[in-house]
Image (cartoon, coloured by chain):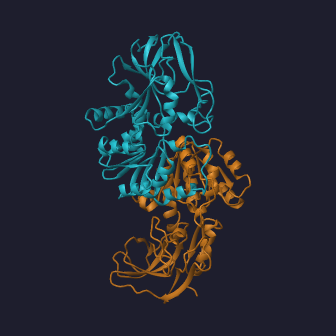
Chain colours: A cyan, B orange
Amino acid sequence: MPQTADKNRQIVLKNRPVGKPDDTTLALETTDLPVAGKGEMLLRVEYLSLDPYMRGRMNDAKSYADPVAVGDPMVGGTVAQVVTSDVEGFAPGDWVLSFSGWQDYAISDGVGVTNMGADPAQPSWALGIMGMPGFTAYCGLLYIGEPKAGETVVTAAATGPVGATVGQIAKIKGCRAVGIAGGPEKCAYAVNELGFDACIDRNAADFAQQLKAACPDGIDVYFENVGGAVFDAVLPLLNPNARVPLCGLISQYNATSLPDGPDRMGALMGALLVKKIKMQGFIIFDDFPHHYPEFSKEMIGWIKSGQIKYREQLVEGLEKAPAAFNDLLEGRNFGKMVVKTGTA
Amino acid sequence: MPQTADKNRQIVLKNRPVGKPDDTTLALETTDLPVAGKGEMLLRVEYLSLDPYMRGRMNDAKSYADPVAVGDPMVGGTVAQVVTSDVEGFAPGDWVLSFSGWQDYAISDGVGVTNMGADPAQPSWALGIMGMPGFTAYCGLLYIGEPKAGETVVTAAATGPVGATVGQIAKIKGCRAVGIAGGPEKCAYAVNELGFDACIDRNAADFAQQLKAACPDGIDVYFENVGGAVFDAVLPLLNPNARVPLCGLISQYNATSLPDGPDRMGALMGALLVKKIKMQGFIIFDDFPHHYPEFSKEMIGWIKSGQIKYREQLVEGLEKAPAAFNDLLEGRNFGKMVVKTGTA
């Protein structure tokens, strides 16, 4: 059934997945519309963000946030419209950025909700270039990566919302930007549309050699969001005093056990030591909240001037979110994955 | 033969070791006294520093410095006296800090040599608390570790010249200092003499549990200089936003192959990510040279006030350096290992 005015569709976590989420992991359920009480408002979700971190929330493990409880709707960033409001500063019709999860409707007391006004230009961009992914790219690159003009910056998932932004900011800062992406179409887009100096297909048989050839002066900043075989190819190319901002490891999220040996943990630490490398994990809204106004101002300027481009992949229909999420985990998206909960 | 005025004893690298250095690795050879030319001076080495990094120089691998060539004397920091001088600013009898290596005599043009004057109070301390190890502890802890009062700082090799200094500075900064050392004697010294809040014997069967009990609020800064089993026990105790300055991995230096699997490299990166940890390798004189005057001034003050204590293990006779170096690699030293090249 489509989005309606009197029922609430939710995608709930039915079973914690072992490995890749499958048909038993999530289910679409329909409940009554929630009722907003005093000091609350009713939100209708228009856009739901799909992001790799959500895979971690499906596990029963304390990560940087609590897991989703079995039976609850999946969590997620959303752009919604206010339907009814008893919250000061929010009126029916206002667009808001909220964390309402995988459902059509939600109740909010306004805490943590940003009012975007009655007529924002590109409301869904608050989930991407102007939101968590863009902000992650900005702070991770500039404040942990600390790129200097002339240095080489490498990012994987180069056409995704984080990687694409990392590469474009690297170019603005005068760096050589080298992307890694899955397939020739994405690589061509990264170079021709986003302005990367080179983009290497991670599926190529000679991927590691191609990456080395694309980084003749080594790698000064590697923005890590995938891990696995990509990192294996990057590590030997890292220069002395390289910086590795670490915001994701999508290649590991569906893993059910550690890979076979040998154990390279000590070897990684040895490489960090002899090359004097900084590797630093970060969670954007934990570690950099005070930088948001600065990010927002700069990013709007770069978008207006055409220095930063942004690509969205819009999936229509909340019911398609589970399949779209698996596409995302396996790199079958092209651009920022957003679900338009209702159909046109 | 002892040190003489007319021959130069050298300990040269005869064979690159596979694993632990043995009797075929180094050899004592005697050559003629080197002759200082115009603009040069002749130095007689009084004290030779033994440091774990020297194991890496025995390998034929480009690390942060070139390997020692087979047939050449081993490199190392030294405190020497000027015998003859044609270098401005250096007079016979002056004590100097130099990098003259494992030998009795060396020629220098004065570049990179620090004049300590005719009568320094504790000349050999320039190789320890006032030199590379002390400076490593100071900058690694303060500028990478960034300890805040009330936080827990853990360091291994807690009675060695780096670890002991890390713990004592941590106490000065208002932190809880927890050491790790080999054996009850060293642990008692760390607590009773150096002022650590606790020190855990890494050889104890329940080492990991003892470490956990000694860190009830987790670990905020782990100063890494050993790796291996010690790091395995530390990793699960690291707090969100912990910092791991990485200046050595002595437990790995004699390893001839990677440990058996599973491969935990990705798991380490995953831990850095979800806990937002910074791990950063550094080489003190590459990365922090401009901090030396500040370090020197602060450290002299701390030593004079009794806030920092320092322990040296003096080995008499250059010929004993190879055995003493193996003792160092295996933790059989107690304090900073220094070779007095001549005998008393």
Residue A119: quarter of image: top left
Q: Residue at x 47, y 65 (%)?
A: B63
Residue A186's x, y, as percent? 38, 42
* Label total for image: 0
Q: Residue at x 53, y 75 (%)?
A: B47
Q: Is residue B5 visible?
A: no
Q: Closest to the observer: B208 or A104?
A: A104
**In the image, is A216 to the left or to the right of A65?**
left
**In the image, is B213 to the left or to the right of A276?**
right
Q: Closest to the observer: A303 or B76?
A: A303
Tell which residue pokes out farthest to the left in this image.
A305
Residue B146's x, y, as percent? 49, 47
Q: Residue at x 57, y 86 (%)?
A: B2
Residue A91's x, y, as percent? 40, 12
**In the image, is B227 to the left or to the right of A96?**
right
Tell which residue pokes out farthest to the right in this image.
B205
Q: Is residue A282 above or below residue B58?
A: above
Q: Is residue A233 visible?
A: yes
Residue B338's x, y, as percent? 57, 71
| Quadrant in which the C terminus of chain A is drawn | top left
Q: Is residue A288 above or below residue B24?
A: above
Q: Is residue B30 above or below residue A69?
A: below
Q: Closest to the observer: A72 or B11?
A: A72
Q: Residue at x 38, y 45 (%)?
A: A184
